[in-house]
Image (cartoon, helix red, strand yellow):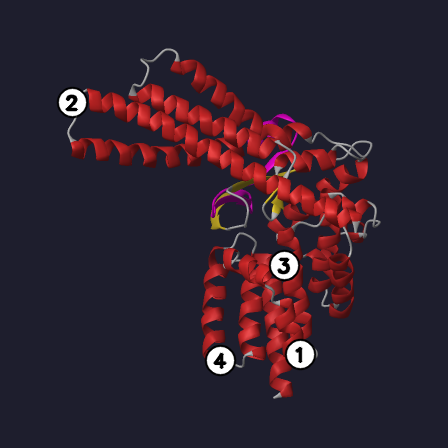
């Protein structure tokens, strides 16, 4: 109970920090824009020109945020390459470049709580260790560097000029992004870079778990299923170790592998165990694991009251923001088909699944999802 309260307190602190940082961005950029517009007004510009300038400055602020997101992910890439990692994928919002079959390809993927992500292939472990800090803090370092650079360059420009305003807006957003990603707090359904770095600093076991996660991603990119990967990668950590957010992901992968092996009872038992315990599994993974529990329930006893209980408001929200994720679409389709008995709704969900499959970066995961769907459809055909 004490661990649960501590975890909730940490998440609440992260939410407040996130709110304060966004307030800082809005207030600071607002002041800078008003200073610039006041200067324009004193220059005798007309009212339409004033509103045009205001609109362009607001658009420019959002463009600056997008550029800082790109810079942030580039920071992970740069420091990863400098410390022995190799390129795997680079994503901004839902647009993704991924290296597969020896060439870089364009795909689409959206993950709740992230504006982007740079995944890399890790170097080999040496004595149970590998460089992790620069890779994790690389984005925040580059954001901070650009903030300092832009702030310095602003002194070379006339105060309240267009370039002066742009540079300071860029500096404000860069500083905010550095804090948002560098401070070790939980912000949203996933941990930020600072929290990951903090978890990694606590043990060699966490470093190995981080290595396993990145190796699993590498193997999936190569078209290798979870069930085909080494057994030792999916050994369930101790309850104590699972309190570490990085290590807890190995427990999630173990559940995913059982689903891929079609060991559904074992998967359901493990998922219930992990969801009922106090551990570091993030909200996003918890809700995706519930989707797997729903699958097991739908192909077995298919009790509507149990499924409605699983389909909590939190899960509905995650499914809404992860609406193009294969396991979410699989859940949506089978719920409509097997529980609601609404064939028209199920057909629409399958159309969305097929559309997602065309652009999804990991075809081997789509193969696994289609197997699960086909199995459920066959069982439904037999029972009917």
Q: Is residue 271 visible?
A: yes
- Label 2 environment density (alpha carbons within 10 Å; few <14, some 14–19, many ≥20): few
User: Which mark is drawn over residue 343?
Assistant: 4
Q: Circle 3 sits in a helix, a strand or a loop, which is it?
A: helix
Alpha-carbon distance for marks 3 and 4? 24 Å
Q: Would you call the spot at circle 3 few (<14 residues within 10 Å), some (14-19), or many (20 or more)?
A: many
Q: Secondary structure at mark 1?
A: loop
Residue carrying label 3: 288
* Picture residue at 46% right of the left edge, 29% below the top: 173
Q: How many marks?
A: 4
Residue on which the image places disc 2: 44
Residue holding disc 1: 303
Of residues 144 and 168, which is closer to you in this image? 168
Please state the extent of the stretch shown in magenta in the rendering: 75-103
For marks 1 and 2, the one nearer the N-term is 2
Most extreme residue toward the bottom, as rendered? Answer: 384
Q: Is residue 168 magenta?
A: no
Lower position in the chain sequence, tag 1 or tag 3: 3
**Label located before the other in sequence (4 or 2):** 2
């Amino acid at each position: 109970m004490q661990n649960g309260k501590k975890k909730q307190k940490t998440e609440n602190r992260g939410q407040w920090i996130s709110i304060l940082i966004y307030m800082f961005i809005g207030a600071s950029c607002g002041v800078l824009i008003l200073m610039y517009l006041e200067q324009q007004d004193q220059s005798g510009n007309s009212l339409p020109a004033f509103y045009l300038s205001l609109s362009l400055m607001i658009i420019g602020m959002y463009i600056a945020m997008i550029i800082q997101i790109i810079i942030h992910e580039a920071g992970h890439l740069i420091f990863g390459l400098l410390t022995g990692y190799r390129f795997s994928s680079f994503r901004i919002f839902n647009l993704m470049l991924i290296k597969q079959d020896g060439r870089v390809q364009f795909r689409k993927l959206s993950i709740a709580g992230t504006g982007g992500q740079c995944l890399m292939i890790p170097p080999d472990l040496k004595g149970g260790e590998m460089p992790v800090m620069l890779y994790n803090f690389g984005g925040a370092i580059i954001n901070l560097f650009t903030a300092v650079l832009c702030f310095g360059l602003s002194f070379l420009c006339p105060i309240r000029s267009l370039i002066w305003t742009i540079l300071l807006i860029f500096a404000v957003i860069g500083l905010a992004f550095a804090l948002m990603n560098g401070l070790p707090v939980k912000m949203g359904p996933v941990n930020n870079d600072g929290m990951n770095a903090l978890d990694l600093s606590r043990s060699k076991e966490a470093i190995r778990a981080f290595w396993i996660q990145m190796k699993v991603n590498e193997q999936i990119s190569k078209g290798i299923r979870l069930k085909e990967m080494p057994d030792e990668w999916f050994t369930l950590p101790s309850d104590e170790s699972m309190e570490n957010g990085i290590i807890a992901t190995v427990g999630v992968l173990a559940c995913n592998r059982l689903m891929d092996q079609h060991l559904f009872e074992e998967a359901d038992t493990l998922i219930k165990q992990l969801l009922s315990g106090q551990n570091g599994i993030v909200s996003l993974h918890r809700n995706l694991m519930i989707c797997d529990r729903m699958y097991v329930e739908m192909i077995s006893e298919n009790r509507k009251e149990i499924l409605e209980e699983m389909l909590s408001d939190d899960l509905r929200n995650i499914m809404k923001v992860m609406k193009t994720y294969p396991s979410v679409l699989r859940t949506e389709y089978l719920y409509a088909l097997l529980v609601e008995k609404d064939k028209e709704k199920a057909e629409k969900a399958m159309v969305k699944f097929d559309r997602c499959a065309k652009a999804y970066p990991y075809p081997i995961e789509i193969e696994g999802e289609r197997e699960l769907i086909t199995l459920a459809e066959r069982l439904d055909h037999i029972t009917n």
